[in-house]
Image (cartoon, helix red, strand yellow):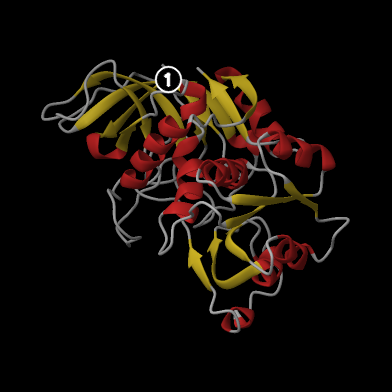
Amino acid sequence: MQQWLVRKGATSLDDLHLVEVAQPVPGPGEVLVRVRACSLNFRDQLIPLGRYMGGTVDRDTVPLSDGAGEVVAVGAGVAGFAPGDRVAGAFFQNWSDGPANPSAGPALGAPPATGMLQEFVVLPETGLVRVAQSLSYEEAACLPCAGVTAWNALMEGPRPVRAGDSVLVLGTGGVSVLAAQIALAAGARVIATSSSDDKLERMRALGVTDLINYRSVPDWGSAAAQLAGGGIDHVVEVGGAGTLGQSIAAVGFAGEIALIGVLTREGDTSPHGLMFKGASIRGIFVGSVGMANRLNAFIDTHAIRPVIDRTFAFADALEAWRYQASAGMFGKVVMAL
């Protein structure tokens, strides 16, 4: 079989290689999956560049946390899955449910875990979820990281999003677009930002009616608060240090900022502005198998279809990486096997 590898010590996309290896065999408690589709996330840009947590990879590593496929064989003792089941890998292999905990890892696609960008993968039974029945493999592959992150941000906090709430999403990447779709399905009012009017129009086509171009509206946080009648109930903060100050300006009284942001590293990160509103920041780092299952049930109930910008062939993975890093990307980039 074939698999893509990020070579040990990688610092550029030139260190990604397609190789031929023996097909794995599932051991006790393990499941063999024929991978049908994978998707890219922002972390997947950092890993081959040596900029992810912990620096360069310390071993050859199959990349990507996000992939979906079908079960082809199971090891001894596996009771929850059978050949033919449609499944996806869970981002964290040891986080079954409940609040965040220090034993959630490993995370697929970074040492010491394998990743999904290979024709076959062996994973523990506990590290798999059944995909939403209404989705294709390509659509299901968009959810393990970005989808579960968006779900956790909106639906797993102390006050899940409900009809009539206001939700602010930043930009038009995978997490933000999926968060907008989840929030709209829950009956919330969604406000979206982007530097591109074309991308804002694509958000409008999804049902988002309140749109802000942050280049033409520099104080977009205050503008979003005004649109929501004084403050936002839920901010999905993907920008990081460079946008957190604006998100604090946007959030309303007793509102919540779901802090995911890794896109920018410099800026004002003082939480002082939250004090006057009784608002809070909740750190989000993807989520659990239970969250993935609840997300998939919600998707089937509300007929949500993840937005796929472009689909590439497995052999063209490097082109997919480069496109996902471009300014034109909207939603998710997928590779089909």
Residue 34's image quarter?
top left
Q: Left or right: 80 with respect to 156?
A: left
**Residue 27 percent coordinates (x, y):** 18, 29
Q: In this view of the protein, which residue sits in the foreground, 250 or 259?
A: 250
Name the quarter where the N terminus is drawn. Answer: top left
Q: Left or right: 175 with respect to 65?
A: right
Q: In this view of the protein, which residue sits in the foreground, 334 or 117?
A: 334
Q: In this view of the protein, which residue sits in the foreground, 288 or 178?
A: 178
- In the displayed structure, 184 sits above or below 162; it is above
**Residue 104 percent coordinates (x, y):** 32, 54
Look at the image and tell me whether residue 47 can be seen. no
**Residue 35 percent coordinates (x, y):** 41, 22
Q: In this view of the protein, which residue sits in the foreground, 141 or 273?
A: 273
Residue drawn at x 52%, y 41% as measured from the top left? 185
- In the displayed structure, 157 sits above or below 311; it is below
Residue drawn at x 45%, y 45% as measured from the top left? 148
Which residue, as the protein is rendered here, is positioned at the far left? 77
Q: Left or right: 35 with respect to 175?
A: left
Classify mark 1: residues with Cα within 10 Å, few (<14), some (14-19) or many (20+): some
Which residue, as the protein is rendered here, is positioned at the far right? 216
Residue 221's image quarter?
bottom right
**Residue 28 percent coordinates (x, y):** 15, 31
**Amino acid type at mark 1:** Glu
Q: Which residue is mark 1?
A: 119
Look at the image and tell me whether residue 241 can be seen. yes
Residue drawn at x 62%, y 41% as measured from the top left? 177
